[in-house]
Image (cartoon, helix red, strand yellow):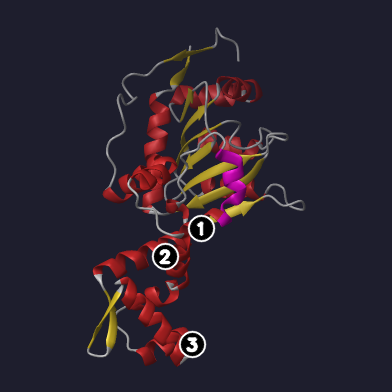
């Protein structure tokens, strides 16, 4: 794309200045945890509040009974039935929980104390986050080097699409299917949202979906070199808005109902994993990240 054909102008009218607007308490708590986690161990040590690893292990091992009691008080027979354990095992469970102050016995039934309820919820959250991190391993390997504060909590129920040797385009196909089913699409990416050879996809973006994309400058240039007339017409009509930024962390996509993140192979440039979800917290997180990146980007205008 020649410099006399297109110029980059900063759009002050549409960019937000200053820090992002505060999110919901849940999102703010997740982000605060992400910001503090690197220093949490040091702070606990300084406050002399480290918990012995044996105790932490015992808490996790008692996770099933803690989870069962979240549904309401149970007697020992109900615990045995719910967890399929022996009478002796249920006795050990309840005795240990009582010693820790996690349960109290009322009318022959065990119910969680306030402390026990918090512990039970944290054990479940820990299990969910570990499980999510394991499912997101291909994505984390692709993005975490550039985005150390990526948070996994919003993606606990996400769809994870990974490239396979016999089907290397699975993530791209998943991404394209979401674009085609969405009336609007916003995103940023370190490379092309889809391979430039996929003319049908780009025609859809140029003519059908209301689109705003933030690219690295040379990626935007390549798009205009490949589709000079179609891209220019889409930009001039306002159907396609292109912005550029000198540095981008990974690929983020916001559709009508879902949000997604893409990770790419550094050698081939192909999308190797795409993770998408309709979680409201993930949507809020994605909107926040997108607006932050957008505010530091420049509008690519036809000149």
Part of the protein shown in magenta = 134-144
**Residue 99 at what x, y percent from top left?**
33, 75
Which image quadrant is residue 43 in? top left
Closer-to-camera residue (59/182): 59
Pointer 1 local density, CA inside 10 Å: few below 14, some 14–19, many at least 20: some
Residue at image mark 1? 130
Closer-to-camera residue (210/12): 12
Rendered image: mark on residue 84: 3
Q: Distance between the residues labelled 2 and 1?
A: 10 Å
Closer-to-camera residue (232/105): 105
Q: Is residue 295 magenta?
A: no
51 lies above or below 146: below
Residue at image mark 2? 124
Quarter of the picture holding the N terminus: top right
Mark 2 touches mark 1? (CB < 8 Å):
no
Whichever of callouts 2 and 1 sits on the residue coming sooner in the sequence is 2
At x 41%, y 80%, the residue is: 93
Q: Main secondary structure of the magenta part?
A: helix
């Amino acid at each position: 794309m020649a410099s006399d054909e297109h110029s980059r102008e900063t759009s002050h009218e549409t960019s937000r200045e200053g820090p992002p607007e505060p999110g919901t308490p849940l999102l703010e708590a997740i982000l605060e945890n992400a910001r503090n986690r690197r220093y949490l161990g040091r702070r606990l040590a300084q406050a002399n509040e480290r918990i012995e690893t044996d105790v932490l292990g015992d808490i996790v091992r008692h996770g099933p009974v803690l989870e069962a009691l979240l549904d309401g008080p149970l007697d020992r027979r109900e615990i045995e039935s719910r967890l399929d354990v022996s009478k002796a095992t249920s006795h050990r469970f309840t005795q240990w929980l009582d010693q820790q102050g996690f349960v109290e016995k009322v009318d022959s039934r065990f119910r969680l104390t306030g402390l026990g309820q918090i512990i039970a919820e944290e054990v479940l959250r820990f299990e969910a986050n570990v499980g999510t991190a394991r499912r997101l391993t291909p994505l984390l390997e692709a993005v975490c080097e550039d985005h150390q504060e990526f948070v996994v909590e919003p993606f606990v129920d996400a769809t994870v699409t990974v490239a396979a040797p016999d089907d290397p385009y699975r993530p791209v196909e998943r991404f394209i299917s979401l674009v085609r089913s969405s009336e609007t699409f916003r995103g940023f990416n370190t490379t092309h949202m889809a391979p430039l050879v996929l003319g049908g996809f780009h025609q859809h973006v140029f003519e059908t979906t209301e689109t705003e994309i933030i690219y690295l400058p040379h990626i935007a240039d390549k798009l205009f070199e490949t589709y000079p007339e179609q891209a220019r017409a889409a930009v001039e009509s306002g159907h396609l808005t292109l912005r550029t930024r000198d540095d981008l962390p990974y690929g983020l996509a916001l559709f009508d109902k879902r949000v997604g993140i893409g990770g790419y192979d550094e050698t081939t440039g192909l999308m190797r994993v795409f993770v998408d979800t309709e979680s409201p917290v993930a949507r809020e997180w994605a909107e926040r990240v997108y607006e932050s990146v957008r505010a530091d980007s420049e509008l690519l205008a036809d000149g």
